[in-house]
Image (cartoon, helix red, strand yellow):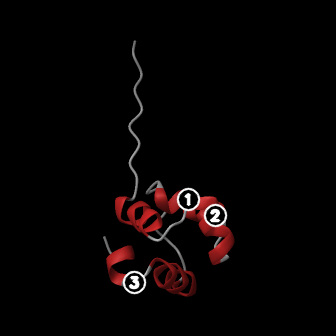
Amino acid sequence: MIRTEIRFKNATFMRALKNNGYRSILQFSKVSGVGYQTLIDYASLRNKVIDLKKRVIIADLLKLDIDVLFDQ
């Protein structure tokens, strides 16, 4: 039996990190003050529930409209 694992990533979020010069989610977590695990879960599409205050911080730092980033 062969097991495969398919991983999905939040392409908009990952592209925005790269376009804004962040080398990693850890670096972005330190700058934004949003928890590392919260960002990992969001980037991996495991959890899209992030409170509004944190959404605004993330969208502002990534220079994206909040609707583009979170209403996919």
Using the image, tell me which numbered label, if any, was put on residue 38: none
Relative to 1, 30 lies left or right: right
Mark 1 belongs to which amino acid? Answer: Arg
How many residues crowd mark 3 within 10 Å: few (<14), some (14–19), many (20+)? Answer: some
Displayed quadrant of residue 26: bottom right
**What residue is disc 3 on?**
66
Task: Name which of mark 2 and mark 3 comes first in the sequence.
Answer: 2
Q: Which residue is drawn at 51% across and 80% down?
A: 61
Displayed quadrant of residue 65: bottom left
x, y (%) of residue 42? 49, 62
**What residue is disc 2 on?**
27
The mark lying in front, picked from 1 and 3, is 1
How many residues crowd mark 1 within 10 Å: few (<14), some (14–19), many (20+)? Answer: few
Measured in 3D between alpha carbons, the distance from the residue under mark 1 to the one under mark 3, in whole angstroms, is: 21 Å
User: Are discs 1 and 2 less than 8 Å apart at CB?
Assistant: yes
x, y (%) of residue 35? 66, 68
Using the image, tell me which numbered label, if any, was put on residue 23: 1
Measured in 3D between alpha carbons, the distance from the residue under mark 1 to the one under mark 2, in whole angstroms, is: 7 Å
Q: Which residue lies furthest to the front in this view?
A: 21
Element type where label 3 sits in the image? helix
Q: Which residue is drawn at 47% across and 71% down?
A: 20
Q: Residue furthest top?
A: 1
Displayed quadrant of residue 6: top left
Mark 2 belongs to which amino acid? Answer: Gln
Element type where label 2 sits in the image? helix
Task: Name which of mark 1 and mark 3 comes first in the sequence.
Answer: 1
Q: In which quarter of the image is the N terminus?
A: top left
